[in-house]
Amino acid sequence: MTQRRLFLQATATLGLSALAPGLVAARADEKKAEEEVTATEDLMREHGVLNRALLIYEEGLRRLRAKEEVPPDAFLRTATLVKKFVEDYHEKLEEDFIFPEFEKARKLADLTAVLRKQHQAGRALTAVILRSAAPEQFRKPEGRQELVGACAGFIRMYRPHEAREDTVLFPALHKVVSAKKLKDLGEQFEKEEDRLFGDEGFEKTVAQVGDIEKQLGIHDLTQFTPK
């Protein structure tokens, strides 16, 4: 009886060993699927980075208007990040891959036309922010005045801009492209992110935003809870 039990145990162990490579591969595929980010999810989480940049601009403007101290490089670091991550990467994805799909399908073309125009306006405002946030300009009253105007205009435009994309444009994407095309876009976006920013580029960018928030003392989420 004992020998038979040992034989069955050994057989079961051999069977599991034979199955192990398949199980490992299946679990790896499952983990990969869990980690995959869809094209729309990718774009919307990048809007989260933009939103946090807008919060930094708002805090900087509040301090300037209240005549409180503002780290001069807070605006410069934020605008540099916006140019590199939002304008040169995120918006280029929208312009090269998302807007054309709607325009070819003749859906929401009026909206994409406005969004394209606002991208150009945003880049012009960022150029002003970068110029006026440079140390030699930031020290001058006229430089800070120019900075305030550009930041205020940027915030005013991008709040409704990203909200319209998140609630109208992106949710409609699955209606103009196939499920396979949507999956391919997600993979293409990930490759472009890796090419420009290296491995975990999104996470690194979020960390940079967090550093600027700490510099301004607005990193603790609990401080925004009404008393």
Image (cartoon, rainbow, N blue to C red):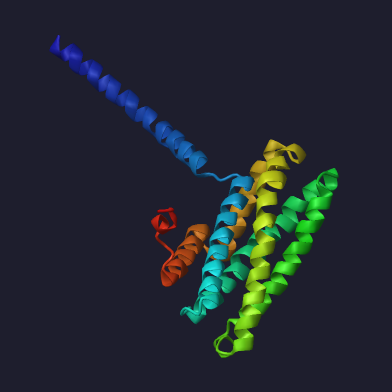
13 lies left or right of 141: left
Vertical arrangement, residue 42 with respect to residue 202, above or below: above
Q: Residue, x 28% and y 20% (percent of image)?
A: 11
Counting from the top left corner in percent of width and height, residue 168 is at 71, 45
Q: Nearer the viewer, residue 33 or 26?
A: 33
Q: Residue, x 42% and y 72% (percent of image)?
A: 215
Q: Nearer the viewer, residue 48 or 223?
A: 223
Quarter of the rendering containing residue 161: bottom right
Q: Residue, x 34% and y 23% (percent of image)?
A: 15
Q: Residue, x 56% and y 67% (percent of image)?
A: 58
207 lies left or right of 165: left
Q: Nearer the viewer, residue 125 or 14?
A: 125
Q: How many marks?
A: 0
Counting from the top left corner in percent of width and height, residue 134 is at 57, 84
Counting from the top left corner in percent of width and height, residue 224 is at 44, 57
Counting from the top left corner in percent of width and height, residue 217 is at 41, 68
Quarter of the rendering containing residue 194: bottom right
Query: Which residue reaches farthest top?
Result: 1
Q: Nearer the viewer, residue 58 or 22?
A: 58
Query: Where does the N terminus fall, quadrant-wise?
Result: top left
Vertical arrangement, residue 68 with respect to residue 32, above or below: below
